[in-house]
Image (tube, grey):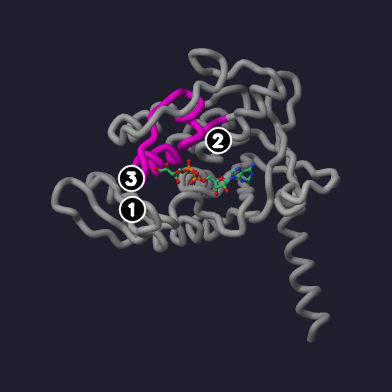
């Protein structure tokens, strides 16, 4: 029995990994915007893989506000929650609340069920660049990176790379600092996230969602950090819309 169980896991994991070494879209970060983009792109017939450095994808959803595990959405966006069969309750003043554990698990299931493999505990530690275009990501096990082991990584090639890494916008940072490229922001560099202003942050998250360099896109807080948008805390409508928007932009570009 031991041999069968072990073989089954090894065979199927490597089948999944080998099938994801060349994809249409490599999504870095399994937060809400990345997971929503993953599902949309897969539903549109694109080959997608998500790389998430933590054991559990879901990003900043799980913890609700200050570990109170409820999050808030604008009442006019409940159709997106309904797409995922996520329960929601009206607050009576233009918003709804949802259980953050239900939201995180629904987004993860939505992406995987649409055919997206999620590689958890895999950290993207670099980009692949060729002829003025980002064309892949460099991956390693997050525990390897955290323990600072001297282990060479592997590479996944893709037509588009999405930085969905949230507040630190890690890929855009690499592109800017390491590759020295000029991003499509007003300064050409990462402008840095501004303090809390929920209303502004919610709308700019969507406006700031864009392609920042050929082959390189940003969604969610990564987009806001790049473009100098305000943070918004535990309201998530902007994140959901950002994921949908970036999927549309990538689809247009890689058609
Ligand atoms: O931050 P995160 O949830 O991304 P998001 O889609 O959503 C932001 C909100 O959760 C919240 C907010 C809403 O009001 O402000 O913060 O912008 O998730 C980002 C995910 O990316 C992973 C990280 O572990 C998290 O799950 N991640 C970060 N860097 C890497 C990474 C990396 N280099 N490689 C792989 N995964």
Q: Quadrant of residue 240?
A: top left
Q: How many marks?
A: 3
Residue hosting label 1: 71
* Location of mark 3 (residue): 235
Of the pair 67 and 119, the residue shown nearer to us? 67
Q: Is residue 233 magenta?
A: yes
Marks 3 and 1, how far apart at CA: 6 Å
Residue under the image location 67 percent in, 23 percent down = 177
- Disc nearer the start of the sequence (1/2): 1
The answer as to whether callout 2 falls within 8 Å of ligand 1 is yes
**Dot 2 surroundings within 10 Å: few (below 14), some, or many (20 or more)?**
some
Please provide percent x and percent y for residue 156: 74, 42
Q: In this view of the protein, can residue 67 be seen by the observer?
A: yes
> From the viewer's perspective, is 146 left or right of 102?
right
Residues at marks 2 and 3 touching, judged by CB atoms closer than 8 Å: no
User: Which residue is under mark 2?
Assistant: 168
Q: Quadrant of the C terminus?
A: top right
Q: Are marks 3 and 1 in contact (CB under 8 Å)?
A: yes
Q: Quadrant of the N terminus?
A: bottom right
**Label 1 to label 2: alpha-carbon separation:** 21 Å
Magenta segment, which residues? 217-244
Q: How far across and how far down the image is residue 170, in percent?
A: 61, 35
């Amino acid at each position: 029995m031991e041999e069968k169980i072990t073989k089954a896991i090894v065979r199927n994991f490597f089948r999944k990994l080998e099938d994801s070494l060349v994809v249409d879209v490599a999504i870095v970060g399994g937060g809400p915007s990345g997971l929503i983009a993953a599902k949309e792109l897969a539903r549109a017939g694109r080959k997608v893989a998500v790389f998430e450095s933590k054991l559990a994808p879901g990003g900043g959803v799980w913890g609700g506000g200050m570990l109170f595990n409820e999050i808030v959405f604008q009442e006019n966006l409940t159709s997106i929650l309904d797409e995922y069969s996520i329960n929601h309750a009206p607050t009576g003043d233009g918003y709804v609340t949802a259980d953050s554990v239900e939201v995180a698990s629904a987004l993860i299931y939505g992406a995987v069920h649409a055919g997206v493999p999620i590689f958890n505990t895999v950290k993207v530690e670099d980009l692949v660049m060729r002829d003025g275009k980002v064309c892949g990501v460099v991956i390693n096990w997050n525990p390897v990176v955290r323990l600072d082991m001297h282990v060479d990584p592997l590479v996944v090639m893709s037509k588009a790379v999405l930085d969905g890494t949230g507040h630190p916008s890690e890929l855009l940072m690499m592109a800017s600092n390491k590759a020295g490229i000029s991003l499509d922001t007003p300064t050409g560099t990462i402008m840095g996230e501004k303090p809390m202003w929920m209303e502004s942050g919610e709308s700019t998250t969507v406006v700031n969602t864009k392609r920042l360099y050929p082959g390189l896109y940003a969604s969610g807080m990564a987009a806001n950090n790049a473009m100098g948008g305000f943070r918004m805390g535990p309201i998530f409508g902007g994140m959901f819309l950002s994921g949908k928007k970036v999927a549309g932009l990538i689809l247009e570009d890689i058609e």
